[in-house]
């Protein structure tokens, strides 16, 4: 076997092992690709240690480029195969509807998801605007039985409704893209320094353990920096202020239907034709029956 072929098969084999480990361990795409890059670049020094005399006439750059495409394809093939064999699969929920309206989501076998369940990335209901059976507009939300005090959990946010009042609270991780985007919309530009200090909108400085209380007309918002990268937010307002900042960053609407209260997120999922994606889950709009 030619020396460079040894490097080729060594790199492809190691990339396949990375794909196998990534699939079994359930690594995120970023984690799996980082492990792949580490393994890819380690092959060259390991190969030189094992077959240094045979590889001395091959340039270092050629060794690093050897099997680049094949290694990446091997990673994706094995990783995808393992996910399909041992992974939980893609969570899919359905709504059987012929017209626009508010609907709890259902499982594939037709079971309606109850108000205490939140399988769809923290949601259990949708508000649909349909054209035929195709999605024209969609919001995701959560619902609970209406009472003197009604609580729903909307993604990472707990919403409490009582006597015209509304309270929102939640903890948001700035390392999670969706949380970071929401906090940026709520607070403006957020910069975290190596020492853990947060600079918010270039004017507000927060150290871990610190908090600030802000007032917008009758709405009070308290932001606490509970730990590096974690923000705790509490907002107290009235239900007539849901279209106003800062409540509007979290809620698009509150609806009453059949003894239940539905609260819908201000952030829309991505949708196309009949399918909407919410994080790594999907909602499919099907005809009734």
Image: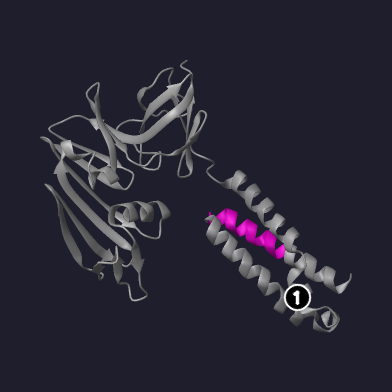
Above or below for 260 versus 241: above
Q: Within the image, what quadrant is residue 144 found in?
A: top left
Where residue 288 appears, as percent x and y from the top left, is 46, 16
Q: Name the residue under label 1.
A: 61
Within-10-Å neighbours for mark 1: few <14, some 14–19, many 20+: few
Residue 21 in magenta?
yes
Q: Within the image, what quadrant is residue 159 found in?
A: top left
Q: Can residue 111 be seen in this view?
A: no
Q: In which quarter of the image is the N terminus?
A: bottom right
Where residue 224 appears, as percent x and y from the top left, is 22, 61
Above or below for 84 versus 99: below
- Foreground residue, 87 or 246? 246
Residue at image coords 53%, 61%:
31
Q: Within the image, what quadrant is residue 56 found in?
A: bottom right
Q: Give the range drawn in magenta.
A: 13-27
Residue at image coords 16%, 36%:
240
Residue at image coords 43%, 20%:
97
SS majority, magenta: helix
The answer to whether 214 appears left or right of 112 in the picture is: left
> What coloring was used for the rendering?
one colour
Where residue 253 appears, as percent x and y from the top left, is 27, 34
């Amino acid at each position: 076997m030619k020396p460079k072929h040894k490097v080729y098969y060594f790199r492809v084999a190691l990339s396949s092992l990375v794909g196998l480990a990534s699939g079994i361990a359930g690594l995120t795409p970023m984690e799996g690709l980082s492990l792949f890059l580490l393994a890819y670049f380690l092959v060259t020094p390991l190969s030189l240690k094992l077959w240094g005399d045979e590889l001395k006439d091959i340039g270092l750059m050629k060794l690093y480029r050897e099997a680049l495409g094949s290694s990446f394809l091997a990673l994706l093939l094995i990783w995808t195969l393992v996910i399909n064999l041992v992974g939980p699969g893609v969570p899919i929920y359905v709504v059987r509807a012929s017209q626009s309206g508010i609907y709890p989501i259902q499982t594939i076998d037709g079971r309606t998801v109850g108000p205490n369940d939140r399988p769809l990335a923290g949601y259990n209901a949708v508000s649909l605007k349909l054209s035929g059976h195709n999605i024209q507009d969609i919001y995701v939300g959560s619902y609970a039985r209406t009472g003197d005090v009604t609580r729903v959990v909307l993604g990472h946010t707990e919403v409490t409704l009582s006597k015209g009042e509304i309270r929102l609270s939640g903890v948001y991780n700035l390392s999670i893209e969706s949380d970071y985007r929401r906090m940026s919309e709520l607070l403006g530009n957020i910069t975290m320094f190596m020492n853990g200090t947060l600079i918010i909108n270039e004017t507000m400085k927060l150290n871990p353990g610190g908090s600030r209380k802000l007032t917008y007309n009758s709405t009070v918002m308290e932001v606490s920096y509970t730990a590096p990268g974690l923000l705790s937010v509490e907002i107290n307002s009235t239900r007539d202020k849901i279209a106003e900042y800062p409540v509007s960053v979290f809620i698009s609407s509150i609806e009453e239907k059949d003894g239940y209260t539905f609260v819908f997120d201000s952030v829309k999922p991505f949708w196309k034709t009949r399918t909407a994606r919410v994080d790594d889950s999907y909602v499919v709009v099907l005809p009734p029956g």
